[in-house]
Amino acid sequence: MATIFLMSIRPQYVRPIFARVKKYELRKLSGAPRIEEGDVVIVYASGNLKSIVGEFTAGRVIEDLPEKVWALVHRPGTGVSRESWNYIRGARRAMAIEVRDPVPYPRPITLDEVRRIIPGWLPPFSYRELYTGDPFYELILRPVRGAIYKKLREPGRSTG
């Protein structure tokens, strides 16, 4: 069964993910839980958006020295920018997560909306694993994801 993660991503990287232009999301590794192929990444758009905007499935996950990760993912057609290199450069280890099947939510779930239900809730600095029973998952994400995937399973609907 896939593990679900909540990941904070800057708005300038979120848009290309859901436009299917950005093929990899890069991260510094610093003791955070391991993301594996098939896991689900819920996207929290940080910055001025401050909203949960959609999700994607993790494809190939590359963990290595930043230079090696960069060499594998920085090529035409991946949507990985020079700013991504500046972000991971100097880390002990880095990770590239292939973005597969991005699904934008019908409307963003704002930080204010989440905090009306869960006062004081904070998005992760980088990313964190979500667990069944976690109030954020149960009260916010489970209903949204259930409605989206029910609609995608309707006859005549395309999932790609």
Image (spheres, grey):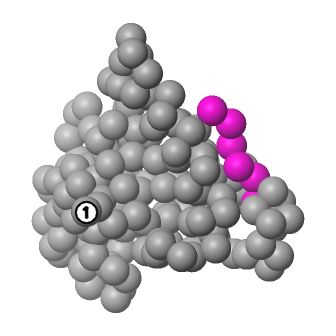
Return the residue at label 1.
Answer: 1
* Residue segment shown in magenta: 106-111
For the image shown, how many numbered marks are present on the structure? 1
Coordinates of residue 139 in the picture (x, y in percent): 66, 63
User: Which residue is at a point 52% across and 45% down the rendered structure image?
Assistant: 146
Residue 123, compared with residue 15, is above or below; it is below
Residue at x 61% of width, y 50% of height? 143
Dominant secondary structure of the magenta stretch? strand
Left or right of 151, for residue 118: right
Drawn side of residue 83 relative to residue 31, left or right: right
Secondary element type, mark 1:
loop
- What percent of the width, then of the height, locates residue 56? 39, 46
From what the image shows, is residue 35 above or below residue 75? below
Q: Can residue 15 be seen by looking at this rendering?
A: no
* 31 is higher (above) or lower (below) than 131: below
Please determine whether, in this image, residue 53 is positioned above or below residue 157.
below
Locate the C terminus and report the quarter of the image it occupies.
top left
Q: Position of residue 74 (x, y in %)?
A: 23, 47
Task: Tell me if residue 109 is in the magenta stretch.
Answer: yes
Residue plotted at (17% across, 53% down): 60
Residue 136 is left or right of residue 130, and the answer is right
Residue type of the residue flagged with mark 1: Met
Q: Which quadrant of the structure image shows residue 64?
A: bottom left
Q: Nearer the viewer, residue 127 or 38?
A: 38
In this rendering, position of residue 58 left or right of residue 141:
left
Magenta stretch holds residue 60: no
Q: Nearer the viewer, residue 59 or 113?
A: 113
* Residue at 20% from the left image edge and 40% from the top image edge: 75
Quarter of the image for residue 141 reads bottom right
Label 1 Cα neighbours within 10 Å, binned few <14 / some 14-19 / many ≥20: few
Could you say where residue 3 lies in the image, as x and y percent from the top left? 33, 66
